[in-house]
Image (spheres, rainbow, N blue to C red):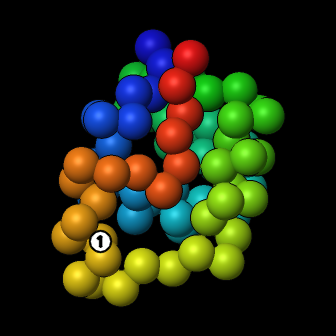
Amino acid sequence: MPINKNEITKEMLEKAMQCKDADELIALAKAEGKEITREEAEACLDKMGDFELDEKDLEKVAGGVACAIVR
């Protein structure tokens, strides 16, 4: 099942930001019962590359998304 941007939680985003490469992000998505392609994972990691949220910004993530993966 693809990831809907409205389903992304603060915890999911925090975990995604810890991924070092596309394989880790793909495995994380799979563990959450979702599927993403290598291209989607790489694009997401590129967007998050130099992006860091402080605690205040993380609280706002519940309804938003730093990386949208939708099929």
Image point 54% across, 67% down: which residue?
Answer: 18
In the image, what residue occupies the spot 67% across and 59% down? 47
Query: Considering only vertical position in the picture, is 25 above or below 38?
Result: below
Instruction: Tell me where residue 34 appears, x and y as whole percent.
Output: 46, 24
Pick whichever, 27 or 62, lies toward us. Answer: 62
Q: Residue at x 51, y 40 (%)?
A: 68
Residue under the point 52% across and 25% down: 70
The N terminus - image quarter: top left
Dot 1 alpha-carbon crowd within 10 angstroms: few under 14, some 14 to 19, many 20 or more: some
Residue 65 vs residue 29, the one in the foreground: 65
Is 7 located above or below residue 61 in the figure? above
Q: How many marks?
A: 1
The residue under label 1 is which amino acid type? Leu
Relative to residue 55, is residue 7 depicted above or below? above
Horizontal side, residue 48 vs residue 28: left or right: right
The x, y position of residue 42, in whole percent, is 76, 46
Q: Is residue 4 visible?
A: yes
User: What is the quadrant of residue 56 in the picture?
Assistant: bottom left
Say which element carries label 1.
helix
Which quadrant would the C terminus be assigned to in this image? top right
Q: Please say whether residue 30 is visible from this viewpoint.
A: no
Residue 51 is situated, as x and y percent measured from the top left of the image, at 58, 75
Asked whether, in this view, residue 53 is left or right of residue 57, the answer is right
Left or right, residue 10 beside residue 68 = left
Residue 5 in which image quadrant: top left
Q: Is residue 12 left or right of residue 60?
A: right
For label 1, the residue is 58
